[in-house]
Image (cartoon, coloured by chain):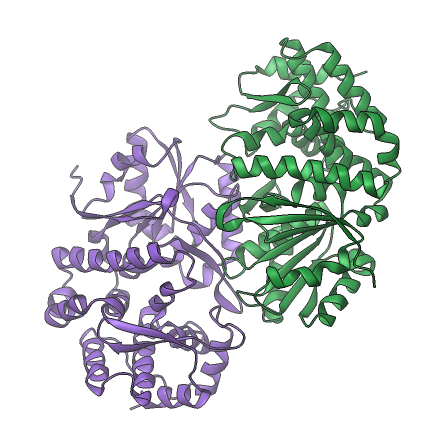
Chain colours: A green, B purple
Amino acid sequence: MSKGTITCRIPVRLGDRSYPIVIGQRTLLGLPEALDFVAPSSRIAVVTSPSLYRLYGEALVEALKEAGFQAWWAQTPDGEEHKTLESAARLYDQFVEHRMERRSLVIALGGGVIGDLAGFVAATYMRGVPFLQVPTTLIAQVDSSVGGKVAVDHPRGKNLIGAFYQPRLVWIDVATLLSLPEREYRAGIAEVLRYGVIASPELFQLLEERMEVVLRRDLNVLAQIVAKSCAIKARIVEEDETESGVRATLNYGHTFAHAIEAATGYQRFRHGEAVAIGMVCAAAMALQRGLVSQEFAERQRRILEAAGLPTACPEEVEPHALLEAMRLDKKVSAGKIRFIVPREVGRVEIRDDFTDSEVIAAIRATYR
Amino acid sequence: MSKGTITCRIPVRLGDRSYPIVIGQRTLLGLPEALDFVAPSSRIAVVTSPSLYRLYGEALVEALKEAGFQAWWAQTPDGEEHKTLESAARLYDQFVEHRMERRSLVIALGGGVIGDLAGFVAATYMRGVPFLQVPTTLIAQVDSSVGGKVAVDHPRGKNLIGAFYQPRLVWIDVATLLSLPEREYRAGIAEVLRYGVIASPELFQLLEERMEVVLRRDLNVLAQIVAKSCAIKARIVEEDETESGVRATLNYGHTFAHAIEAATGYQRFRHGEAVAIGMVCAAAMALQRGLVSQEFAERQRRILEAAGLPTACPEEVEPHALLEAMRLDKKVSAGKIRFIVPREVGRVEIRDDFTDSEVIAAIRATYR
């Protein structure tokens, strides 16, 4: 069976917690060969959902067994509503049942929910066992699988219970994106565009020029944009592992996005869609203050629309309800809400001096 | 009100996770003054049980408020049976309710159960908020509050869900030991004796010579033995924060102890009592192999008995059941059980080459 083609290898340098991101095309079943370098033990839990098990998990578990590992499927439901302490508890139970030890390996196979949940369980089972991220959605490949943020949700806030716990390896096969539903795929593009705005005019321009090819999911272009995104994320995480400074810029669009998701009960928008709206809000707020040009705001809106992403806050959501939700965000410090605002393509800044009325005006500015 | 007398300050040097252990007599209410150096925020959760709140918590919360902090009582039940993910979940709820932020401070006021639980919640709430240990039992003062091991239990194993997460400060007031029930206090002495065996002939001898004064809970002697114990623990933790090597020696007596506790449903023995029996088992096993002298084994048994601690495994517990329980321990690697065995007072070694029949013979050797 083919082991695919590795496109590139991006190091994440964090001292004794360093690891590589390996990006390739159709490389999923090449993973067992790479494991000699990361796994000291033979027991491996592949944490994934029933549907992903059928798509990729079963073949991966078989390939691991053929390579001599004692691999098994740790079953977990997918979907944000299952990213809970209860799901974590059920994984702990399975780990005990299968006698997972301190040196046993956890592989998170799936999107952001599974990566965050499995990562949290790996971080806390026996005070931490090694784990790998094998992300299968665009949003997970370019964002959540890299950087060691793991968590489960609390009824009152997303990712409220978690840890900083780095994986030993991030293994990305962009071919897994071919099975993504269209809407989920497009939502991931919002996160890629965000990297363009915060750090890379080149990536932003690439997406402007080649959006059609991107939407067709050409594997070469996919490998390229995933690699560029991961490289940006890796540099930022290296500089600020626990988000005390520059890492916060990754939250561009996210302060609004989290509030929009919370205010709409996490049902109406996919995370990436909320991020797209959040980016438009942030740009509107910066524009009001004269921090960014009208041209930037329009350019950003055009490319988001080209990706088929929403760009307007739903009018039936009370702006004051969004403000209230923002105050519950983890990033709030001494009651002040921190925003990331754009200055130009490739440059953003962190500010906490916006008034409530500026925030509300920005939300309203996105209505049509 | 008197702020008591600080006896000594022991640094735990762990790079950017360094912190001091401050030991004193009647210093509990002096804590607010020390906080300027550790707490960047004004909101403080004092996690403690109803009974400890009445004894010490209420006065501490009041003192914190007087010093200008927004302190509040995060209520949690005490007792090993409550060291669960469910108790953690109830603390997360309270933290959200009280709008605890990333820079808010958690103070764990209590014994090992509260320290481990509050520490785990601090480690995972918003991916980690600063916390302090204010241990009020002997076992917590000399052991569990130092070193950053935090955890909750799983039905199938103690401390199975946890993290390595260092406190910002350990604040020890040995006067809090005056309110400990006799049996709990004596159980703590087992842990102190353990330090003697693994690292300090002086401490061992001090206890042999002054056991009566120790049992009388003379505050000066208490401050002395707590300080010596903490200093040993600090050095070991500095050398091996995440227990990949020498830190394992702290588990002297504990492999047997955990199994004895599990096999007796955590009801019959206090942890320190099980450790006392475990130390006798470990010495018996070492003696069988000729690794330690008969004289050592007898000397250890005498001092444990002088402290009123049990030294015999209960005969009705099947030795094979203990072996089975040991195999479930976190320290098991590739099925091998790791034991810490004594060589002489002040020196132990880590071995994983004991046969099942040696283990069983050692258990039986403790019967009378």
Is residue A272 shown above or below B138?
Answer: above
- Quadrant the N terminus of chain A occupies: bottom right
Image height of B229 relative to B339, above or below: above
Residue B303 in the figure: left or right of residue A210: left
Image location of residue B355, percent across then percent down? 44, 87
**From where the camera sits, is residue B45 visible?**
yes
Above or below, B291 relative to A126: below
In the rendered image, which quarter is residue B255 located in? Answer: bottom left
Residue plotted at (32% across, 51% down): B52
> Residue B173: percent from the left, percent from the top?
23, 49
Q: Is residue A255 left or right of residue B61?
A: right
Whole-percent x, y for residue A310 in the image = 80, 27
Q: Nearer the viewer, residue A12 or A281?
A: A12
Q: Quadrant of residue A224?
A: top right
Residue at the spot 27% in from the left edge and 59% down from the top edge: B142
| Residue drawn at x 47%, y 47% as measured from the top left | B123
- Res A90 visible: no
Question: Residue sitting at 34 percent across and 37 percent down?
Answer: B38
Image mark count: 0
Image quarter in which the C terminus of chain A is found: top right
Judged left or right of residue B107, residue B205 is left
Residue A308 placement (x, y as % from top left): 85, 29
Note whether B245 is above or below B93 in the view shown: below
